[in-house]
Image (cartoon, rainbow, N blue to C red):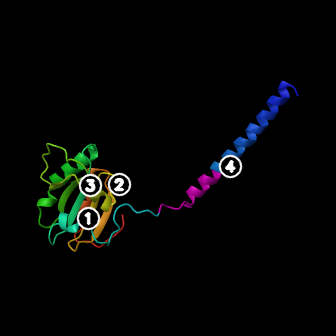
Amino acid sequence: MDFVTSALLVSWVAIALLALVVSGLVRQVHQLSRGGVARSPRHLGVTPGSPAPHAGDLLAEGRDTLLLFLSAECRTCADVLAEADRAGAHRSADGPQVRAVYAGAAPTPTAATVPVTDHRPDLFTAYDAIATPFAVVVGATGRVVRSEPLGSPAALRELLAAPYPSQPRSA
């Protein structure tokens, strides 16, 4: 077998493999366009409707509470905390009591007047807050109403604009 024959043979094998790869990609695109991909069944955070862990330590008596799980190194977390302070929901009688929770030390100095609980990695585990910033709304009855990650201060504004008390719903 000479060089030209070998090159042609290798080229045809490469073309056949490329055709198989392209057909697999086309099949995946068709499946995605039909919505045939199953979504992850994993829900982030505590399931709405379930009792809030460590409720006595964190929650305002007879009032909805918004727990903000934050990280001192997270820039978005600082923006969310500033937005919570600006919104003043924790000072209002009709809005939820807002409380910031940190796994480690809270950043200092902070101009925010939102109550802070720091050095509580156990709360991150109990509330399944795997990303920061993360929000958990707990109703006055001590049951989780909403549990979802926050991507921006605008998401917090939207959450604070929701009617309270509200029925448990999934994120």
Q: Residues within 10 Å of mark 4 (few under 14, many from 20)?
A: few
- Cα separation, mark 1 vs mark 2, equals 16 Å
Tell me which label, 4 or 1, sits earlier in the chain.
Answer: 4
| Amino acid type assigned to the residue bearing label 4 in the image | Ser
Q: CA distance from mark 4 to mark 2?
A: 38 Å
**Quadrant, the N terminus:** top right
Q: Is residue 71 left or right of residue 31?
A: left
- Image quarter in which the C terminus is found: bottom left
Which is more N-terminal, label 1 or label 3?
A: 3
x and y percentages locating residue 139 in the rendered image: 23, 70
Q: Is residue 148 magenta?
A: no
Q: Amino acid at mark 3?
A: Phe
Q: Looking at the image, is mark 1 or mark 2 nearer the viewer?
A: 2
Assess disc 1: are there few (<14), some (14-19) or many (≥20) residues with their C-alpha within 10 Å of its C-alpha: many
Asked if the stretch drawn in magenta spans residue 31, the answer is yes
Which stretch is magenta? 26-40
Quickly name the residue at label 4: 23
Farthest top residue?
3
Q: Which mark is residue 69?
A: 3
Residue at image coords 27%, 68%: 52
Locate residue 15: give its quadrant. top right
How far apart are the two marked residues, 4 and 1, measured between alpha carbons?
A: 47 Å
Instruction: Report the residue marked by disc 1.
Output: 137
Residue pointed to by mark 2: 130
Q: Amino acid at mark 1?
A: Val
- Against 119, residue 144 (above or below) is below
Element type at marker 4? helix
Q: Nearer the viewer, mark 4 or mark 2?
A: 2
Query: Is label 3 in contact with label 1 (beta carbons under 8 Å)?
Result: no
